[in-house]
Every structure is written in structure tokens, then in C-alpha cells.
């Protein structure tokens, strides 16, 4: 099984905040992005160039499936958790920028892939009070590094080099990545395991855990801990609710909490 680190790239007005592990004395915990949606998100799915990947129907289906799983589980106990979704074909957005879609507050964009160990990235721009957005980028392919050895007639003529082989990500992996990156776009940075795994059983099941396997056939889901993380940001009443919004930077996942003060 290959483990891919899902890096967050966060664009801020005053600089860049990098995801990091901060020691917490209370047990497993999560960190937030520090910003939240004031109103129901407008999700804009920017379909990929069919020349990059022709699995357009599948990509659309898994994207809707991932968004709906978050929405359905957040809404299970009530609250305003609805999102609006608009889908754009490549011909409609191929040369456009975020400024061309001022109503979009979550962009989901697909690319061929990048030559590092990440398969998804999320950033945000909340620098304008009247227009803000999260930008989600999903890879459709990832690389596999292999050692290439060429044996010459002598040691000086022999070479060893890294070979990069591109592999198309399967449907289940793409859905897992969308689930994770969409969680960033709701305001959660990552879930961290701080439990002593030699004494207690560690829980790596939350979709917002910071690494995810690919090509292993695993189907991930949003867990109750993931839902708890989001509700500590927005309150049980959901987007734009009456609960006073306090956006913690770090929360003990197992602690009792009042008004989401962590």
C-alpha cells in the first residue's frame, strides 16, 4: 500500500499557514483552517479537460456522491446544511479564472496530476468580505517511482536513475480524495492521532486524517468524528445559523465542549 500525504496549501492575506502537528496533551485532536462559510456554500464543479481524462461521467458521479455524503450526515440531526451545486464543462471554464465565477464559494477542479506525493490540494482566499472561496484541486493520476538500471560494459558506463511512471487513479480513490479535500473546504484542516498507540487503540478512520492510501481498494467514509469537527465550527444549526461562531484553531476530539470552545 502506498500512503499519499494530502498537503494543504493555504493562501492568506498576511502569509501562508502550513499544516503542522502541534502537541496536544489531551488526546486525539483536530485543527481548523481558521475560516468558515457565512452562508450556504455554492459549490462549482469544474469538469476536467476530456483530453486529460475521458471518465467524465464517473468523475461527476463520485464528486456529487462525496458532497452528498457530507451534507446528508451533517443534516441527520437537523440544521441548515444544504449546499448549492453547479457543474461546468471544460468548454465553459477552460480559460476562465475564479473572478469569472463570483458566486462560487467552493471550486472543485480536476487536473492530470503533479510530480510529488500529493493527490489533492486545498487553498482559500478570504481576503475580500464580499467574495471569498475555497479552491479544491484533485489529481486524476499519480506517479510511481521505480529504479531504472542500465548495465554497461564497465561500471563507468552503467547508470542508475529514477523512473517516473504515471498511473491513473481508480474511482474509489478519487472519491476518497474528494471526501477529504471537501472537508478542508468546510473548514477542517486535519485530524491528528495523539494517542499512545502502544497502550490504546489508535483511530485512523476519520476522512480528515492527514494521509490516505491509494491503489489499496479501501473505501473511506465520513465518520462521526468528522461531523463533530465541522459542527464545532458552525454549531448544530449549520451555515449562517444563530449560534455565535467561534472558530477554534485546535480542539480535543474527545473532550466535552460547550459552544464549541475547545
Image (tube, rainbow, N blue to C red):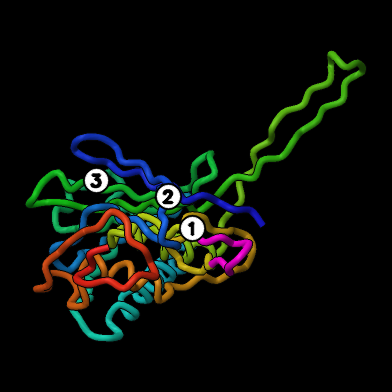
| Circle nearer the N terminus (2, 1) | 2
Total labels drawn: 3
Q: Which mark is residue 128?
A: none
Dot 2 falls on a residue whose secondary structure is loop
Residue 8 located within the stretch drawn in magenta: no
Residue toward you, 114 or 198 = 198
Q: CA distance from mark 1 to mark 3?
A: 43 Å
Question: For residue 146, what is the image quadrant?
Answer: top right
Residue at 54%, 44% (x, y): give it.
117
Rendering quarter of residue 42: bottom left
Residue 19 in picture, x, y percent from top left? 38, 46
Foreground mark, 1 or 3, reads 1
What crowding class fits label 2: few (fewer than 14 Cα within 10 Å), some (14-19), or many (20 or more)? few
The N terminus, quarter of image: bottom right
Q: Residue at horizontal 46%, vertical 67%?
A: 206
Is residue 139 found left or right of 143 in the rendered image?
left
Amino acid at each position: 500500500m502506498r500512503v499519499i500525504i494530502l498537503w494543504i496549501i493555504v493562501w492568506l492575506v498576511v502569509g501562508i499557514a502550513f499544516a503542522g502537528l502541534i502537541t496536544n496533551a489531551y488526546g486525539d485532536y483536530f485543527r481548523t483552517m481558521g475560516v468558515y462559510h457565512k452562508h450556504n456554500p455554492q459549490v462549482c464543479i469544474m469538469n476536467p479537460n476530456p483530453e486529460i481524462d475521458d471518465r467524465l461521467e464517473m468523475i461527476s458521479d463520485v464528486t456529487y456522491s462525496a458532497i452528498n455524503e457530507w451534507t446528508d450526515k451533517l443534516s441527520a440531526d437537523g440544521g441548515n446544511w444544504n449546499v448549492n451545486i453547479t457543474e461546468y464543462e471544460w468548454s465553459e471554464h477552460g480559460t476562465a479564472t475564479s473572478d469569472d465565477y463570483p458566486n462560487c464559494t467552493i471550486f472543485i477542479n480536476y487536473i492530470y496530476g503533479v510530480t510529488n506525493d500529493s493527490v489533492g490540494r486545498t487553498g482559500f482566499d478570504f481576503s475580500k468580505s464580499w467574495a471569498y472561496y475555497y479552491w479544491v484541486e484533485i489529481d486524476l493520476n499519480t506517479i510511481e517511482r521505480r529504479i531504472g538500471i542500465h548495465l554497461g560494459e564497465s561500471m563507468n558506463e552503467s547508470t542508475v536513475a529514477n523512473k517516473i511512471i504515471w498511473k491513473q487513479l481508480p474511482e474509489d480513490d478519487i472519491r476518497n480524495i474528494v471526501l477529504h479535500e471537501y472537508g478542508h473546504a468546510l473548514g477542517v484542516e486535519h485530524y491528528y492521532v495523539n494517542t499512545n498507540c502502544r497502550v490504546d487503540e489508535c483511530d485512523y478512520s476519520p476522512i480528515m486524517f492527514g494521509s490516505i492510501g491509494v491503489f489499496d481498494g479501501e473505501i473511506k467514509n465520513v465518520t462521526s468524528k468528522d461531523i463533530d469537527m465541522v459542527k464545532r465550527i458552525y454549531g448544530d444549526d449549520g451555515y449562517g445559523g444563530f449560534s455565535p461562531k467561534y472558530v477554534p484553531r485546535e480542539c480535543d476530539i474527545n473532550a466535552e465542549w460547550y459552544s464549541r470552545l475547545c
